[in-house]
Amino acid sequence: MLIVQKYGGTSVGTVERIRAVARRCLATQRRGHDVVVIVSAMSGETNRLLGLAKQIAALPDERELDVIASTGEQVTVGLMALAIHAEGGQAVSLLGHQVRILTDSAFARARIQDIDARAITSALQAGKIAVIAGFQGVDKDGNITTLGRGGSDTSAVAVAAALKAEACEIYTDVDGVYTADPNVVRSARKVDRISYEEMLELASLGAKVLQIRSVEFGMKYGVPIHVRSSFNDNEGTWVVPEEKDMESVVVAGVTATRDEAKVTLPGIPDKPGIQAQVFKPLAAAGIVVDVIVQAHIQNGRTNLTFTIPSADVPRAREVLSKSCSDILPADQIKTEENLSKVSVVGVGMRSHAGVALKMFEIFAQEGIHIHLISTSEIKISCVIDAKYAELAVRSLHDGFELGKA
């Protein structure tokens, strides 16, 4: 079998941990598998490098930021290859441009377009472990690019897809995907298997176990992803295509996002094109809009409300005051911060009624006010006051009995 293993910053955070990972990689190879290893920068290193850049320039050029940030992974792959050599194995380190992980030119948030796997295949044929720098690639002009926070997960699953690997093992500091954050809910239970769709929703809704684009790659190319701990040998959580018995589990997990904000444009004209006038400049400014609710009032007027990250509120107000000055005075734009979005996710919602009702009843029992509601086929999200987020997660986890196997 061909196994791709990815180790995050915590797993390679010290020289001793790098040696431990090297021993784990060699143990996998000695069981008869070909092994490809993707590593992140050592814990805290990327933040240190970006901090240096910001000491030089308040708004650093993103191309140069990628040049700087990518060096963290370059150090780790070299150390990992040396550690494997020291343990009696053979390894070769490969950077993004050496593998030829081709991306677009969106510096700091590049997307993978193609992977030339020949350098990896050559290493494996020579009996070596291929140690690849995660998080980085190269554009068509030869510029170094990076994939954004958590990008090493995406690198790993993309490489696994390119090599048609039997599995992609994501080693981290937790031992799998849980029904809720164990730091918030003591009875949170590790899930043995979860569908790509459920994992994609959980990742987009605040679960930090996997990066969203890595799940998208896995889903698109059918790569089984095994999330497990680098500090023990326990079986973790498998992220796989949806299976029939998954439908019997109505809710697979509960999660919450922090630092949400609500923006309301009251009494704007209810006419075609008004939504485009509002959201086009926000998109151009890179502001991600989430939950959107429009409510007709009277006399051809409507209230338009949507959520954005709290950090984007000042910029959103500035953008909207300019782009919407003909439909609404700037001082009438209403914003509310200190909100959280709490969600329940499960493919079983497709075939079970009453999930939304139960969620609303639980919130009512706890006296939690719901600001906004958003749904999809396998998800229900409620925007609430941030101070109730942990209470909401615990109550939903208990209410849907997620602590039971």
Image (cartoon, rainbow, N blue to C red):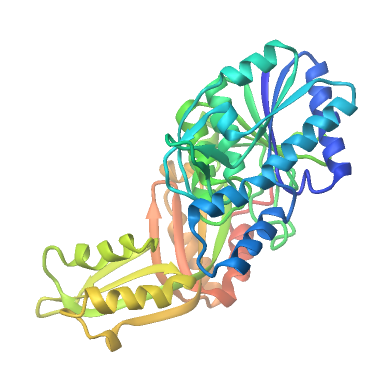
Q: Nearer the viewer, residue 23 or 290?
A: 23
Q: Quadrant of the C terminus?
A: top right
Q: Which quadrant of the structure image shows residue 334?
A: bottom left
Q: Is residue 112 above or below residue 123?
A: below
Residue 239 visible in this rendered orientation of the protein: no
Q: Is residue 246 above or below residue 89?
A: below
Lateral position of residue 268 relative to residue 145, left or right: left
**Which residue sits at x=66%, y=42%?**
191
Q: Nearer the viewer, residue 272 or 357?
A: 272
Lateral position of residue 254 relative to residue 185, left or right: left
Task: Pinpoint residue 125: horizontal percent, then vertical percent.
Answer: 68, 11
Q: Is residue 118 above or below residue 325?
A: above
Task: Pinpoint residue 116: horizontal percent, then vertical percent.
Answer: 52, 23
**Which residue sits at x=78%, y=34%?**
80
Lateral position of residue 148 relative to residue 298, left or right: right
Task: Pinpoint residue 145: horizontal percent, then vertical percent.
Answer: 51, 43
Residue 304 visible in this rendered orientation of the protein: yes
Q: Which quadrant of the structure image shows residue 135?
A: top right
Q: Quadrant of the N terminus?
A: top right
Task: Pinpoint residue 67: horizontal percent, then vertical percent.
Answer: 57, 48
Q: Residue furthest front?
A: 56
Q: Nearer the viewer, residue 274 or 134?
A: 134
Lateral position of residue 93 relative to residue 302, left or right: right
Q: Disc count in the image?
A: 0
**Which residue sits at x=65%, y=64%?**
51
Q: Residue furthest bottom?
A: 331
Q: Is residue 218 above or below residue 403?
A: above
